[in-house]
Image: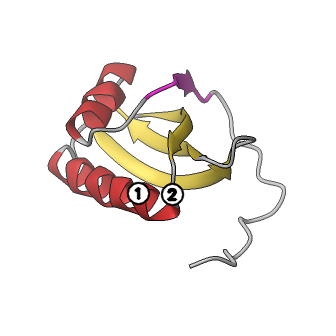
Amino acid sequence: MQTYVVVRRSAWPTLDEQREADLRSAFEAARMADDVECIRSYVLEESDRTLGSVCIFQASSPEAVRRHAAAADLPVGEIVKVVDTVLALPDPVSTTS
């Protein structure tokens, strides 16, 4: 398995719709457990006030990430292979629920 970053720009108009997408993503990742594992996602506030995300995946290939996105009805703007991880500090605790 390789680590990939998936960028989804301006994908959702509301946080509720983004959360629904997260549920679909989790469901499809469970179905594709041999090929895709969702590590974490960061929800982004875009300049037009829509929401995007940056998602970290472990996957067998970029194609597996694309199959997961298609099955979960998620956009894919870009898939980037991660070659190294530098951890300065752990992720902060989220202040939104």
Circle 1 crowding by C-alpha within 10 Å: few under 14, some 14–19, many from 20: few
**Residue type marked 2:** Thr
Distance between mark 1 and mark 2 Cα atoms? 5 Å
Which stretch did the figure color magenta? 76-82
**Residue type marked 1:** Glu
The quarter of the rendered structure image containing the N terminus is top left
Residue in the foreground of this view, choosing between 14 and 7? 14
Q: Position of residue 56 (x, y in %)?
A: 52, 44
Vertical comparison of 41 with 34: above or below: below
For disc 2, the marked residue is 14
Instruction: Verify whether residue 93 appears in magenta.
Output: no
Task: Please say if the residues under marks 1 and 2 sit with CB atoms less than 8 Å apart.
Answer: yes
Vertical comparison of 82 with 18: above or below: above
In the rendered structure, the answer to whether residue 30 lies left or right of residue 41 reads left
For disc 1, the marked residue is 17
**Residue in view at x 26 percent, y 31 percent:** 70
**Residue in view at x 28 percent, y 38 percent:** 73
Residue in the foreground of this view, choosing between 15 and 8? 15
Q: Position of residue 2 (x, y in %)?
A: 45, 32
* Secondary element at image label 1: helix
Q: Position of residue 91 (x, y in %)?
A: 71, 65
Circle 2 crowding by C-alpha within 10 Å: few under 14, some 14–19, many from 20: few
- The quarter holding residue 26 reads bottom left
In the rendered structure, the answer to whether residue 46 lies left or right of residue 89 reads left
The quarter of the rendered structure image containing the C terminus is bottom right
Instruction: Verify whether residue 81 appears in magenta.
Output: yes
